[in-house]
């Protein structure tokens, strides 16, 4: 029974943070029991963790090739782990145990997701007459017994499960899409992808950890619906990303355009980022006196935008009826999400890129996002935004939330050089009757020499995708009156071609004058 992750990536720590991994060269029942208990308690809402038995560790890194386990002992170890879940942990808890062969050696991977009925306690010793139990948690990459303040805080989490990992009793198992689940497994390179077609939807969902409840009454988890339902907004009404663009007069003006992205969480996020990248990002060439080389800067570095959006998707509250909102103005891009960060986060630490939340809001969403390579891990998004803005020579990013932690805002200013060019462009293009020509439309106008078909224009631009070309290049140029059809009364004609209008030619001249 394979796990829904790539085991080779797991061993390299690429898909799972080291604090959620523990390596054991040989079989140690007591130590394994305590670590399973710690992962089940999931003290920081990180999503539980993995124990790899048969692989040694040195300085926090796995020693490969693995030493491995005696293949003849695997069944006995699996039975012992099952028995420990009944007799040595309270309440009962059962991790998922899967044998793998790596470099010709057999290892065991124990997946211990955060439990639904924490706190859990485990026996301190495994003797027949030993009855003393203790609570265990993870501190960094170590398993420790919870005492004092930690034990009190753990007890306060009794049966509290993050929203994304809760059972959704308004949904049915059939609300999960097998196609989306298989697509995910193929994308992350899981061995489970090969077996998924032969499994029932219930079996597949159980193995992926997106179905909970007893066998007689199974239900999808919220994260399963967010990831693997084509219309998750039916269950989470505000699960969407709103991208709002304001012309130069800003939010106080009368004009704005809005595009709303919905759908499974990965697709929704990718589509919103692709839309922003296609329509609002540009590169500015800066010429330096006395230097032959020019430098190029992005108006806003894409890496910073991606981290800000993924951070909002990961950390927002899906039980709050507010979408993620991205506001794009001529001088900045703002990402808003609700509510704000964990109460343990201090604004001054966050602005310095050193904030470490005490507890994460969505333990399973983060796990899926990392497998999909949307994010590298916990607490890395803010430093990456800061570094990307600095590397681009942009003004520093701004982060803000209120005293009640009711919202979180990331503000990404446009690079001054790009802003100067944009302001100049608006002034020049005002003479020809337009105040906004995107970079895509500029490229289209530049190659439109004479009357050309759609296919010819795409070829000149080196674009393969028809829908993207029409949405981002052709239609905006037609709407702005910069291009016209040669057969306007038959827009779908196979002989249709496009040419510059007088207004379009004036824009081309203005742009050429600016670049001279």
Image (tube, helix red, strand yellow):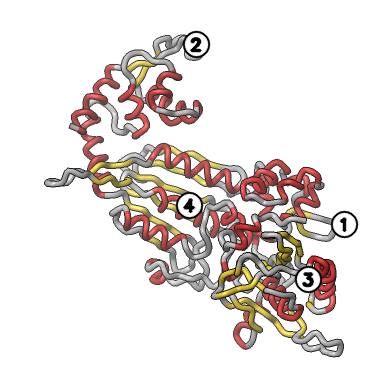
Q: Position of residue 8 (x, y in %)?
A: 63, 57
Q: Residues within 10 Å of mark 3 (few under 14, many from 20)?
A: many
Residue sticking out furthest to the front? 104
Q: Is residue 297 rendered to the left or right of residue 187?
A: left
Q: Quadrant of the C terminus?
A: top left
Q: Is residue 349 rendered to the left or right of residue 370?
A: left
| Distance (Cα) linking label 4 and label 3 | 36 Å
Dot 3 or dot 2, earlier in sequence: 3
The residue at 56%/73% (across/down) is: 60
Relative to 475, residue 62 above or below: below
| Distance (Cα) linking label 1 and label 4 | 39 Å
The kind of secondary structure element at disc 4 is helix
The kind of secondary structure element at disc 3 is loop
Q: In this rendering, does residue 376 appear at all?
A: yes
Q: Nearer the viewer, residue 55 or 1?
A: 55
Q: Quadrant of residue 144?
A: bottom right
Q: In this rendering, does residue 319 appear at all?
A: no
Q: Quadrant of residue 65?
A: bottom right
Q: Is residue 21 rendered to the left or right of residue 441?
A: right
Say which residue label 2 marks. 493
Q: Quadrant of residue 399?
A: bottom left
Residue 309's label in the rendered image is: 4
Say which residue label 1 marks. 216
Residue 378's label in the rendered image is: none
Residue 93's label in the rendered image is: 3
| Distance (Cα) linking label 4 and label 2 | 40 Å
The kind of secondary structure element at disc 1 is loop
Dot 1 or dot 4, earlier in sequence: 1
């Amino acid at each position: 029974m394979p796990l829904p992750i790539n085991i080779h990536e797991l061993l390299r720590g690429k898909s799972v943070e080291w604090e959620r991994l523990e390596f054991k060269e040989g079989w140690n029942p007591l130590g394994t029991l305590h670590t399973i208990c710690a992962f089940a308690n999931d003290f920081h809402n990180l999503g539980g963790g993995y124990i790899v038995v048969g692989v040694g560790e040195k300085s926090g890194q796995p020693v490969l090739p693995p030493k491995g386990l005696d293949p003849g002992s695997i069944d006995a170890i699996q039975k012992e782990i099952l028995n420990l879940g009944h007799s040595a942990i309270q309440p009962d808890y059962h991790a998922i145990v899967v044998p793998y062969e790596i470099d010709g050696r057999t290892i065991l991977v124990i997946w211990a997701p955060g439990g639904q009925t924490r706190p859990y306690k485990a026996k301190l010793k495994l003797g027949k007459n030993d009855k003393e139990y203790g609570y265990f948690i993870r501190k960094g990459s170590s398993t420790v017994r919870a005492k004092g303040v930690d034990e009190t805080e753990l007890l306060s989490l009794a049966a509290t499960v993050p929203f994304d990992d809760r059972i959704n009793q308004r949904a049915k198992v059939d609300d999960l899409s097998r196609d989306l689940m298989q697509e995910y497994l193929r994308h992350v390179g899981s061995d489970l992808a090969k077996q998924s077609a032969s499994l029932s939807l219930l079996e597949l969902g159980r193995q992926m950890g997106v179905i909970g409840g007893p066998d007689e009454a199974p239900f999808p988890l919220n994260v399963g619906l967010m990831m693997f339902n084509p219309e998750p907004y039916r269950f989470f009404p505000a699960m969407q990303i709103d991208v709002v663009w304001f012309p130069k007069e800003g939010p106080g003006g009368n004009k704005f355009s809005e595009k709303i992205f919905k759908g499974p969480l990965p697709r929704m996020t990718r589509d919103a980022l692709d839309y922003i990248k296609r329509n609002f990002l540009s590169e500015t060439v800066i010429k330096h006196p006395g230097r032959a080389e020019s430098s190029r800067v992005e108006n806003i570095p894409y890496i910073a935008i991606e981290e800000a959006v993924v951070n909002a998707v990961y950390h927002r509250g899906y039980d709050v009826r507010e979408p993620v909102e991205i506001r794009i103005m001529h001088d900045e891009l703002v990402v808003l999400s609700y509510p704000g960060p964990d109460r343990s986060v201090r604004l001054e630490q966050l602005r310095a890129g050193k904030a470490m939340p005490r507890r994460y809001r969505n333990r399973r969403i983060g796990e899926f996002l990392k497998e999909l390579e949307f994010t590298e891990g916990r607490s890395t998004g803010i430093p990456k935004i800061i570094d990307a803005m600095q590397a681009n020579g942009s003004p520093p990013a701004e982060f803000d939330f209120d005293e009640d932690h009711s919202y979180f805002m990331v503000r990404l200013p446009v690079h001054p050089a790009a802003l100067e060019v944009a302001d100049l462009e608006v002034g020049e293009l005002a003479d020809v009757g337009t105040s906004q020509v995107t970079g895509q439309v500029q490229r289209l106008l530049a190659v439109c020499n004479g009357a050309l078909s759609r296919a010819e224009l795409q070829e000149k631009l080196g674009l393969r995708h028809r829908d993207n070309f029409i949405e981002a290049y052709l239609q905006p140029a037609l709407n702005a009156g910069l291009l016209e059809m040669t057969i306007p009364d038959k827009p779908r004609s196979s002989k249709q071609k496009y040419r510059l209008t007088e207004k379009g030619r004036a824009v081309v001249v203005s742009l050429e004058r600016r670049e001279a």
